[in-house]
């Protein structure tokens, strides 16, 4: 999630089971305190490990003034997935933006003999524009009216002035008025 003008104040992530078997997992992050990826260890409340399937992810990001935006996505856990060890969700520092990923189904001939921890990437929080760039005013309407806009408006004015000079209607109206006046006088 990238802030548009104001800094992001808080990001809330809710992961829920579409079948309603377990209570949703609610994760909350403050980008000023912790930066990096938001991860989920596939555990619902009560230390229940999520089996293979699709799970709904709702993300709400609010700026420092309380204006919020939200989005939804799906996490898909494949049929053959490594069971994560007992741990708590922790953010990992990464500087590349990503979207919500879905894990593709890949059949495996034999299960590995060792179990390695695997976290599911949900979203990433990006750092806002540096303050010195924002203070200089770069990128926020530096030029009030670009040159091409002024040129187009000038050409439109010339076009309308030329049309007004070449318009035969005023002369035709004066001729019609003279003809009507002649009939009225007679």
Image (cartoon, helix red, strand yellow):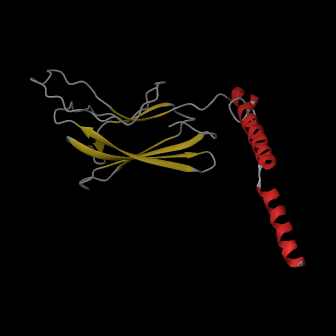
Q: Residue at x 26, y 31 (%)?
A: 85
- The image quarter in which residue 156 lies: top right
x and y, in percent, of residue 88 in the image: 36, 36
Question: Is 168 left or right of 15, judged from the image as shown?
Answer: right
x and y, in percent, of residue 107 in the image: 13, 28
Question: Is 104 left or right of 25, judged from the image as shown?
Answer: left
Q: Residue at x 30, y 40 (%)?
A: 75
Outermost residue on the front side: it is 186
x and y, in percent, of residue 138 in the image: 71, 29
Question: Where the C terminus falls, by quadrant?
Answer: bottom right
Q: Residue at x 37, y 37 (%)?
A: 100
Question: Is 22 left or right of 99, judged from the image as shown?
Answer: left
Outermost residue on the top side: it is 113
Outermost residue on the left side: it is 109
x and y, in percent, of residue 50 in the image: 24, 42
Q: Is residue 43 above or below residue 110?
A: below
Outermost residue on the right side: it is 185
Label total for image: 0
- The image quarter in which residue 181 lies: bottom right
Question: Is 38 left or right of 80, judged from the image as shown?
Answer: right
Q: Residue at x 21, y 43 (%)?
A: 53
Q: Is residue 35 above or below residue 18?
A: above
- The image quarter in which residue 81 lies: top left
């Amino acid at each position: 999630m990238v802030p548009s003008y104001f800094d992001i104040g808080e990001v809330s992530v809710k992961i829920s089971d579409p079948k309603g078997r377990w209570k949703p997992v609610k994760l909350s992050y403050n980008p000023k305190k912790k930066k990096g990826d938001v991860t989920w260890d596939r555990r619902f409340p009560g230390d229940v490990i999520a089996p293979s399937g699709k799970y709904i992810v709702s993300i709400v990001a609010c700026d420092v003034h309380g204006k919020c935006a939200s989005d939804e996505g799906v996490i898909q856990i494949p049929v053959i997935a490594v069971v994560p060890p007992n741990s708590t969700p922790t953010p990992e520092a990464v500087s590349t933006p990503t979207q919500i990923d879905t894990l593709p189904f890949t059949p495996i001939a034999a299960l590995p003999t060792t179990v390695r921890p695997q976290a599911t990437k949900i979203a990433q929080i990006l750092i806002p524009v540096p303050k010195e760039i924002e203070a200089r005013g770069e990128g926020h309407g530096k030029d009030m009216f670009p040159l091409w806009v002024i040129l187009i408006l000038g050409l439109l004015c010339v076009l309308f002035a030329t049309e007004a000079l070449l318009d035969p209607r005023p002369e035709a109206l004066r001729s019609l008025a003279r003809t009507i006046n002649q009939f009225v006088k007679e």
